[in-house]
Amino acid sequence: MEESAKVYPCRYEVQKEMHDFKIFEIIGGPDEIVEELTGVHTDANGFVLMFAIDDPSSFLKVMDKWYPTLNKGDMWQGNEPAIVVGTKRDLRENQLVIQRLAQDNQAPVTQEQGESLVADKIKKYFDCSSIEPHNVDEAFDWILSLGFADLNAEKYGYAFSDSNADDS
């Protein structure tokens, strides 16, 4: 059977203190795998839905599969922050990618399409590129800081605010 999830333990600085986090990557697969995996991650502190800008089918999977799965309520406990990340921003204007997608009457996913998913529980969209680099650190800073602050605001006496609300 194909691997369906990976766990990445990491240390990350939030509010000038180092903290341990675990990032769970649920790899797309058959619907029954999605159902099985989502049931075990009900204690998540935040969610990141990702798609590749050069792969419109991955965007459709986020829209048609993952967003509804999160919103069913059995996975999303209520206040956990969630963001959408479009990866490979550097390929949006790549002529080879544009030509390849055009052969199937497709085009790279636009920033506007990504931003269209921001509603209700999805709080922010980030267009990212690890090649350029663009917004990779910002996306992780945003979701980890917000998830951590929501859980520990009372203990540490602060809450995270998005000081870069217009930057994406």
Image (cartoon, rainbow, N blue to C red):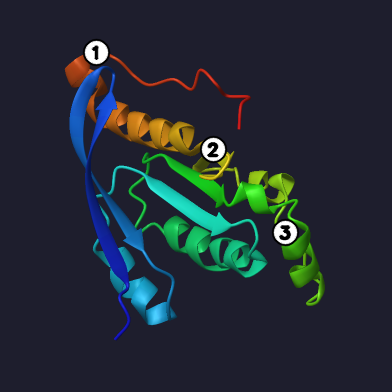
Q: Which mark is residue 52?
A: none
Find disc 2 in the rendering and name its residue: 133
Q: For the residue carrying disc 1, how many other residues have a C-alpha within 10 Å: few (<14), some (14-19), or many (20+)?
A: few
Residue at 56% across, 40% down = 126
Q: CA distance from mark 1 to mark 3?
A: 43 Å
**Mark 1 vs mark 2: which is more N-terminal?**
2
Q: CA distance from mark 1 to mark 2?
A: 33 Å
Residue 118 x/y as whole percent: 60, 43
Q: Nearer the viewer, residue 97 or 109?
A: 97
Q: Nearer the viewer, residue 77 or 9?
A: 9
Label 3 sits on a secondary structure element that is: loop
Q: For the residue carrying disc 3, how many other residues have a C-alpha within 10 Å: few (<14), some (14-19), or many (20+)?
A: many
Q: Report the mark closest to the observer, 2 or 3.
A: 2
Q: Nearer the viewer, residue 146 or 93?
A: 93
Left or right of 55 in this view: 68: left
Label 2 sits on a secondary structure element that is: loop
Residue at 36% across, 41% down = 80
Amino acid type indicated by mark 2: Pro
Is 1 rendered above or below residue 105?
below
Residue at 75% across, 51% down = 93
Amino acid type indicated by mark 3: Pro
Q: Are marks 1 and 3 in contact (CB under 8 Å)?
A: no
Label 1 sits on a secondary structure element that is: loop
Residue 154 x/y as whole percent: 22, 19
Q: Are marks 2 and 3 in contact (CB under 8 Å)?
A: no
Q: Which mark is residue 157?
A: 1
Amino acid type indicated by mark 1: Gly
